[in-house]
Image: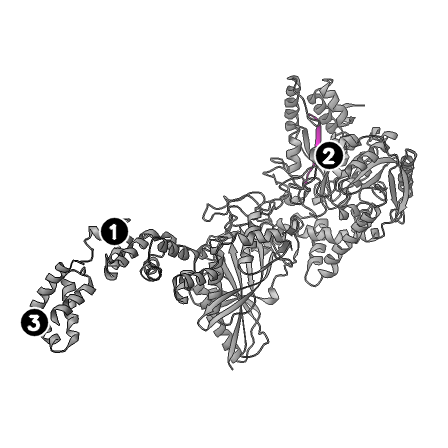
Amino acid sequence: MSYEAVIGLEIHSELKTKTKIFCGCATSFGAEHNTHVCPVCLGLPGVLPVLNKRVLEFAIKAGLALNCKINNFSKFDRKNYYYPDLPKNWQTSQYDLPICEHGYVDIETSKGKKRIRITRIHMEEDAGKLVHSGNTIKDSETSNVDYNRTGVPLIEIVSEPDMSTPEEARLYMEKVKSILQYIDVSNCKMEEGNLRADLNVSLRPKGSDVLGTRTEMKNINSFKAVEEALEYEIERQEEVLEDGGHIIQETRTWDPDRGVTLSMRSKENAHDYRYMPEPDLVPIITSDEEIEKFRESLPELPDARQARLESEYGLSSYDAGIITSSRQMAEYFDAVVAAGADAKLAANWIMGDLSKNLNAEGIGIEESPVEAQRLGEMIGLISKGTISSKIAKKVFEEMWKCPDSPEKIVKDKGLVQITDTKAIEAIVDKVIADNPKAVEEYKGGKKKAIGSLVGQVMKQSKGKANPQMVNQLLAQKLD
Amino acid sequence: MKLFEQPAHVLHDMLVNKEITSLELTQAVLARIDEVEGDVQAYLTITREEALAQAKAVDEKIAKGEEIAFLEGIPGAIKDNICTKGIKTTCASKILQKFVPPYDATVMQKLEAQNPVVLGKTNLDEFAMGGSTENSAYHPTCNPWNTDCVPGGSSGGSAAAVAAGTAVWALGSDTGGSIRQPASFCGVVGMKPTYGRVSRYGLVAYASSLDQIGPITKDVTDCAHILNIIAGRDEMDSTSLDVQVPDFTKALVQDVKGLKIGLPKEYFVKGMDPEVEAAVKNGVKELEKLGAEVVEISLPNTDYAISTYYLIAPAEAATNLARYDGVSYGERAEDASDLVEMMTKTRTQYLGEEVKRRIMIGNYALSAGYYDAYYLKALKVRRLVKEDYDKAFKDVDVIICPAAPSVAYKIGEKIANPLEMYLQDACTVPLNLAGLPGISVPCGYNKDKMPIGMQIIGKALDEETILRVAYTYEQSQSYHEDRAQLGGK
């Protein structure tokens, strides 16, 4: 039988507020254990939470950017379960009245555009972190708790089960990440756990509209892992079903080293979270006027920006899609163009040499040693004919290494294109004189022979001769 | 009257007029503690040295001719579920037996601006769960009027201290009657303000939507003064109300002319001690004589208040108390081989029976499959109870009923029967469900000279009217001048 996968994602994203969701402690990552704590986030007896207004603002902006309806009346609830990283032994979250509902994002798959619906977005607090003495909890003598992360604000974005391939799931998560970065509500640093997803997947016979039993994989924090974990899990479920077995509803963990998913907790052992309304926080009332103000404050979002790049600069949909996939890249592109560069050349350089170098060094475009201004100037030199595209590659490599302007590099290294007819003519004459065989072949009708002559001229000019002029002069002299 | 028997407003005047020093006063109250604390056992912690040092500091200030605040230099006590920075706060539980808060409750910050002399922390039913202070994990507190009897609860330590003269004033907390009922049992004044009037920040939560801190004092005047100090919006408590706080002492006028008092018929029925009923009705008659109008009213959902309360309060308690797991503070059980065992053993060993009972009830009520039938239904009935009051208050200015269906009973008499204990809360829990303010003022005694309290209930945020009625009544009588004589044994 052939199966189709049904995939839904719950994406957790830390919000980049300066302080925690219910107290004034800092949210910054990487501090010494238990230094960003206070009575409130430690859950000491008698403390009360106070909602950080920025959290609400960021959650509403995320909702608007993800095409959600913002609820005028919303509230917090207690999600009760015992775990040492949760000092109160409940997580303050939202249950039946989340801040945002009924949104969607569009993704561009290899088979075309697809809309993924978003069920809801709610606000909640993050838990702390266990620090084990050994490598895992099982081989540890002791475990300590670091409460720095306790109370860092999160939004949970719950999708409908609208995805049917691992690729779609990855594209959806990439799109959500990009949008959250555009509106500047999350750093989305996946390696720091800023953005992580729980993947729900089930299989059903192709064409069926009945949902199969699903499994869930928690805390997946890279796009690669999203695809790999889903690929593995779909294959595993397929095998179980093919063998006449049935899927157990359970939570499975993804082991990226072994590339497998492993059973963690079955439904029978699932928590009863005993949700109840949080009596220490008042309901959240948001007026339509406030919502409209937030909507007006949103920046240009990826889809709109892509459309603009296509119409304004004539970029292909593919190129515009890549350039706008992150706000940083899109802003870099705009800055390159503003520095006077041709838009298409700018796109090519950003997607080509720049991306290649950034990837090789594992840094983001915002950390690029070649600032947008300098890249723009360099592209300007190509357009002016000062340097050839080929020389530009050398200039770019120099720019990567030193902060000099492209003009200075070109000058210092003597990379200016030779456009002096006399200088080129001298080399051309010399090459014609030195290569009688090739000249004869060309004159005998073998037009291709001119290629080796051009090559000789370029070589002798150390690549600096303007190739068009070389071609022109050779043709003049031989014809 | 001896110094320790005087109310705070009298002592304040004596301090201002330099008739006494704060040190003399503090020493007098500490001597009273030495004399009777062995019989009353109102305290869990006594901060003698700090109290004396504070008294001296205040005296220096007075000597310099500086002005002093109302409570300045006057010794009082704090219920041991209100966090005091650097002073142990146990909630009368073994699980917090060594817990020293690193922060002050908002009410403590407000009090400290007044430089009062804090004598220590008073006994309570563990985590404020109970109505007799017998659920304290340390020791029971005895009623100063008859030490064989309970002082009521859960603020039994605070009420007993004020009644015994081992504190001039005290703070309590009221979740289902925990200020008003012990005030009634101990013949003192106790007020539960409107929910949200006083910050709960630093009050160790029992049931968050019901808890409220309030004063326990020797008379209505002191009550108004202390309410002035502790009331007001607090940025640390989202549920505290952002409203103007009036000067409550302005309500201390003898005038009930034209005031309409509602007598709810549902409160004067089965289970009510006839002597209590008679004393409260006499009190109402007195107010009528003074010019008030009395009408019978109906609060039809009163019967459901107890069952509603005993679902909502335990449900909130079950989550509020989940934090006592032995992980980062409080006691931790030894010899656990894994995490679940550590948490289970800790909670089993260090939490008391009544606390565990309410945690079980609460978790049951919140469980999947039971939530709608119990918790959600209780929330709906809570609304009905509130609507009863809203309706009644369209016609009347205050509602009067007893603060408890009986006088103080013998220690040990009811403790074996939790359900009977729960029924004792019938007169007080409806206010907590509705968030309304209520005050208990002494209105007489039964044949054994045990005090009876009259409860005056007001509209939300209308503490002024109930203070005015309470003050008018008090001044027409002399009960507030009576002092407990430590009978019994």
Q: Secondary structure at mark 2?
A: loop
Can you identify the residue that label 3 sits on? Answer: A436
**Which contiguous range is marked in magenta?**
B73-81
- Callout 2–callout 1 Cβ contact below 8 Å: no
Image-quadrant location for residue B83:
top right
Q: Residue at x 65, y 23 (%)?
A: B58
Labels 2 and 1 positioned on one and the same chain: no
Image quadrant occupied by the N terminus of chain B: top right
Question: Residue B209: where, in percent of width, then height?
Answer: 70, 48
Residue B227 visible, this angle:
yes
Question: Residue A284: where, in percent of width, then height?
Answer: 64, 51
Can you identify the residue that label 2 sits on? Answer: B246
Q: Secondary structure at mark 3?
A: helix
Distance between mark 2 and mark 1 Cα atoms? 75 Å
Dot 3: chain letter: A
Q: Residue at x 63, y 36 (%)?
A: B84
Distance between mark 2 and mark 3 Cα atoms? 110 Å
Q: Nearer the viewer, mark 2 or mark 3?
A: 3
Q: Amino acid at mark 1?
A: Glu
Ranked by sequence position, the earlier of labels 3 and 1 is 1
Labels 2 and 3 positioned on one and the same chain: no
Vertical comparison of B434 with A470: above or below: above
Residue A59 visible, this angle:
no
Vertical comparison of B9 with A35: above or below: above
